[in-house]
Amino acid sequence: MASDVDTAPLVGRAELVQTVRSALLGDGAHGQTAAVFLTGESGVGKTRLLGEIGDRLREQGAVVLTGSCLDIGDASPLHPLLQALRRFDADLSTRARTSSAVRGLLQMFADETAGPDGAGALLERVSRGLHLIAEGRPLVLILDDLQWVDRSTRQLLLYLLAGLGDLQLSVLAAVRAESLQGAHPLRRVLTELRRLRTVRVLDLAPLGRADTEELAAAVVGRTLSAEAAEQVWQRSGGNPFVIEELARDLRDGRDGLSETLREIFLDRVDALPQHAHAVVHAVAAGVEPVQHWLLAQVLRLPEDELIDAARAAVAHRLLVGADDGYRLRHRLVAEVLAHELLPAERSGLHRRYAEALTAAPGELHQARLAHHWRLAGEPARALPAAVAAAQEAERLHGYAEAHRHWSAALQLAADPGPLTVDRVELLENAAEAAHHCGEHARALALLEELAALRGGEPSCALHIRRARYLAAAGRSALAEEEYQRALKAADCSPRDRAAAAARLAELLLHLGRYADAGERAREALALAENVEGSATEIVLASSALGFSDACLEDPDAGLAVMRDALDTAERAGQPEDVACAYLHLAELLTGPLNILEEGVVVARRGAERVAELGLGRTWGTRLLAIAINGLFRVGQWAEAEKVVAAALRHRPSGADAVELLLARCRLSVGYGDIEAAGRDLDAVATLLAGGGARHVIPLLTLRSGLAMWEGRHDVARLAVQRGLTESRSDDVMILSALVWHGLRAEAEAHASRTVDVDPTAVRRLRDVADRVARKSAGAARPVRSVVEGFLALCAAEVSRLDGSDPELWAVSAAEWDGRNHPYPAAYSRLRQAEALLARRSRVATAGKLLREAYHVAQGLGAVPLTSEIRELAGRARVSLEEREPNGTTRGAPTEESDDELAALTAREREVLALVAEGLTNKEIGQRLFISERTIGVHVSHIFDKLQVRTRVQASAIQLRNHRG
C-alpha cells in the first residue's frame, strides 16, 4: 500500500534495513540459503522497505529479482518469479550472457508441458536456470504480497530454501499479517521454514512517536506544532501510510478525514464477522483500555461468542489485546466509525458504558464516568464525576489530568440541570491546575474570567495569584508590579502579606537582585512568625535569604539556611515548596559558589523528585537546565546533551522554556551550531516579554558570542551595549561575562580589521569592569573568585588592542584551570600562544599551549575554537600532534596500541557507531535527540580526528576497531 507522497523519506527503519542486509548477505549467510519474511499490517511500509533493501543489495553486487504475488489464487503458477525475470530482463543493458540466461529460463517456462517427471523436475530446472543467471554472484529473490502466493511458488520456496537445488540464494518477502487467518496455506509454509536456522520472520512494527513526527514533518515541509504532532501520532498509531495521508491533509489545508483513509478502514471493518464488527464499534466508543468484563456488560454477548469476536478483531489488526483490556490499533478507526452510527446508537453505547461502570463493585472510575455520561447526553450526571476525577488527579499530583478534568467540568457547568454549581470555585481550581501543569497562558485567561465574574476591585489574593502566573509565564516585570499591589491592598491579611513578601523575594532572586531579595525575605520571615501553618512562606523566604547571604556575605551560613529550607519543604510535603528549595540550592551550587559537581547532582536529583510530585514539566525542566549549565562549565558537553534531550520531552513553556533554551544555546554556540543557536535565541527573545536581567543579560551575551563566531563583530558589540542597560542586577557574574564578550568583540574587530574599534565602547566597558571589580570586592569569596576569572579575561582582551600580552593570558588560563572550567582555559591558551607567536618569542612554548588547547577543544567538540587553533597552528607551522619518545604521534596507532578511536569523545563514538550502521545525520539526530546540524558538526569532527574524508572510510575504522 503506497501513498502518493512519493518524496516521503524512509524513517525509523535504518536498524531493520541493516539487520535484513546482514541476514541475507552478511558473513553468517555466506555460501548458504537465507530468507527473511517481513510481516505487518497494511500500510506499515513493507513494500517501501523491500524496494529500499533491494537497492542496497544491488549496490553490494547482488543479483536482485523482484516480483509481486496476485490476489487470484492459484490461477497463475510461479507468477511472481516470471514477473521478476521479465523485469530483470527489461533492465539488463550490458551483460549479454546474463540476458541470455534470463531469456532461456523464460522460454523454458513457455515450453513447459505436463510430463511424467512432474513438479520436481520443473523445480530442478528453475534452480539451474537461476544458477546461470547469478553467474557466481549473490542472488536475492524479493517477493511482495506473499499472502497471495500461488501453490507452485510456495513449493519452489520450500525446495530452494531447504537446499534441495544446486543454488544458494536469499529470499526477502513481505506478508500482510491480517490476511493470514484460519487455515491459510502460507501459515503452514512459514511454520516449516521457521525451523531452518537461516530463516527469520520479522514483524514490522509501527513507527514510534519521534519517527512519526519526523515523517509527518518531511511530508508537510516544516516542523509540526506540538498539537499537530500529537494529533498525527494519536490518529495514525505509527502506521506510515496513515501518517503520510494525514500529513498531506495538513500540508494542503484539508480538514477532517480523507476519503482514501475512510474507505480503507471501513473496508477492513466491514470484512469482520458480525459480532467482531460490534466489538470494534464498542471499543471505539470506549475509553481505552476497555476491560473484557466491561465489554461484556456493554455488548451483552455470551462469553464464548464475545471471545471469538474479539479474537477475530485482533487477528484482522483492528484491535490489540492485552492483560489490561482492548485497544484500537489506530485511533483513526474511532473517527471513521463515529460517523457510521446514528446519534441514538452512539448515546446508547455511552449510556451502557456509564451504567456498567456505576454498577461495578469497588472504586468508581470517575474520569470514565464523566466521559460517558457527557456523551450520553447527561451533563448533570457527568459534572460530579468530572469534579471527582479532577480532585483524584490532584491528590496524585497529576496536574495535567486535573486541568483536563476541571476544564471539562467548566463546560458541563454551562448546563448543570438541577445541580447548584459554584462557577467561581471551578475557575479557581481550573486556573491553579493549568498553572501547575505549565499551561501558563490558559491559567491567566481563567484568572481574568474569574476576576470578571467576581467584579469590583481585585482582592489581595487575586493579585498574588496573578503575580505567580505572570512570573511562571516569564513576564517578571508585570509580576513584580502585581506583588507590590498585593502588599498595598486594603484587604491584605497577615497571611497574604507574608505570602506576597515571600514570593516577591523569590522573584527578585530570579531577577538577580540579591540585596532586594534578602530584604524582602527578612520581611516575609518576620510576618510568617505570627501566622500559623506558614510553611510555604518560610520555605520561600528562607531559600531567598540563604541565596542572598551566600552571594553577598557568608556562603557557608547561606548554604546552611538553604539546606534547612529544603528539609522544611520535604517535611511539609507541598510540591511547589520542595521544587523551589531544590531549584535555589542547585542554582547556588552551580552558579555563585562554583561547587559544580555537587550542584549538578542536586539539580538532577531534584528534577527526579519534582517529577514524582507532578511538576516535571515546570520545575523539573528548570532543574535540568541548571544541570546542563553545570555540565557545560565542567566540560561534560556530551552528557549535557543527554540532559537536554530528557528535558525537551517535557515540552516546557514560559519561563521554564526560557531556562532550557538558554542552556541548550550555550551548547550550540560552543559546538558552532549557528543555525540552532540562532533559532533558540530568537525563541527566548519572543518568550522574554517583560523579563529581567537574570535572563536578558545571558541572552545578549550568547547573541554576542554567536555573532563573533560568525565574524559579525558589529552585531556582537550592539548586543553587549544593550545588555549594559540592564543595571538593576546584583549578579556580578553574569555582568562580568557580558563585559568580557564586549571587550572580546572589540579585540576581534581590531584583529580582523573588518570593523573599526569603538574607543567609546572600550572606555565604557573598562569602566563597567572596574565597577564590577569594586562591587564584587564585598561579595562572598566564591563569587569574587569567578568574577576575577572574567576580569582576567577582560584585562587580556584589552591588551589585544595594543599588542597582546602573553602574561595576562597566562594569568587568565591559570584562573580558569583553578575553577575547573576547561573552555575559557583553552581559549586563554590559544590567545597566549597567539601573543607569543606575534612577538616571535618562545615558539616551543606557544606550540605546547596550542596543543593543550587543541586537545581540550577537540575533547569538548568545540568546533569554532578548534578551527581557530588549527588555523593559527597552520600559519605558524606548529604541529598539533605531540611526539612520543619512539617518534610516533601521540594517539596514532602503533604495534602496542591500535585503538584508532582513542581521540574521539564518548558522544563522537556514539555518532560514529550509528554512521557505521548506515544511518543518515537526520536519523542519528532522531536516535540521540540532537539536531541534524549538530550531528553534522560531530561527523565533521570525527573526520578530522580520524583523518578520513568519507563516511565509508570512517565506518571501516569503526568496524575494524570493534571486530569480534
Image (spheres, rainbow, N blue to C red):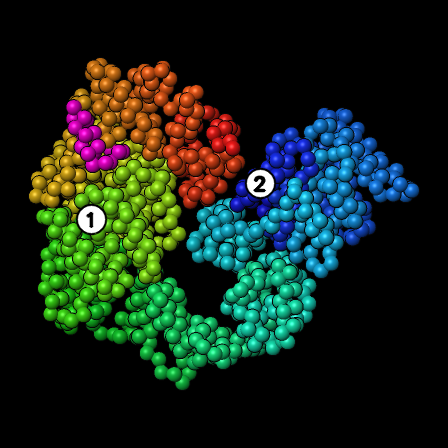
Q: Position of residue 563 (x, y in %)?
A: 19, 55
Residue in the image at 39% along x and 29% along y: 902
Label 2, residues with CA under 10 Å away: few <14, some 14-19, many ≥20: some
Horizontally, residue 772 falls left or right of residue 384, namely: left
Q: What amino acid is at disc 2?
A: Thr
Q: How many marks?
A: 2
Where is residue 153? Give x, y as percent. Answer: 77, 45
**Dot 1, how many residues are within 10 Å of its Cα: few (below 14), some (14-19), or many (20+)?**
many
For label 2, the SS is helix
Residue at 8% x, 40% y is: 777
Residue at (13, 47) in percent of width and height: 555
- Between 247 and 841, the residue placed more toward the observer is 841
Query: What x and y, as percent, mark residue 634?
Result: 27, 38
Question: Which quadrant of the view contains residue 296?
Answer: bottom right
- In the image, is 280 to the left or to the right of 474? right
515 over 335 or under it: above or below: above
Q: Residue furthest bottom?
A: 418
Is 812 contained in the magenta span? yes
What residue would you read off at disc 2? 19
Q: Who is closer to the viewer here, 682 or 379?
A: 379
Q: Which mark is residue 588?
A: 1
Question: Tag 1, which secondary structure?
Answer: helix
Amino acid tagged 1: Leu
Query: Would residue 764 be seen by someone viewing this image from the given angle?
Result: no
Main SS category, magenta section: helix
Residue at (28% x, 23% y) in the render: 850
Q: Quadrant of residue 938?
A: top left
**Vertical order, 501 against 217 (above or below):** below
Task: Please state the extent of the stretch shown in magenta in the rendering.
Answer: 807-824
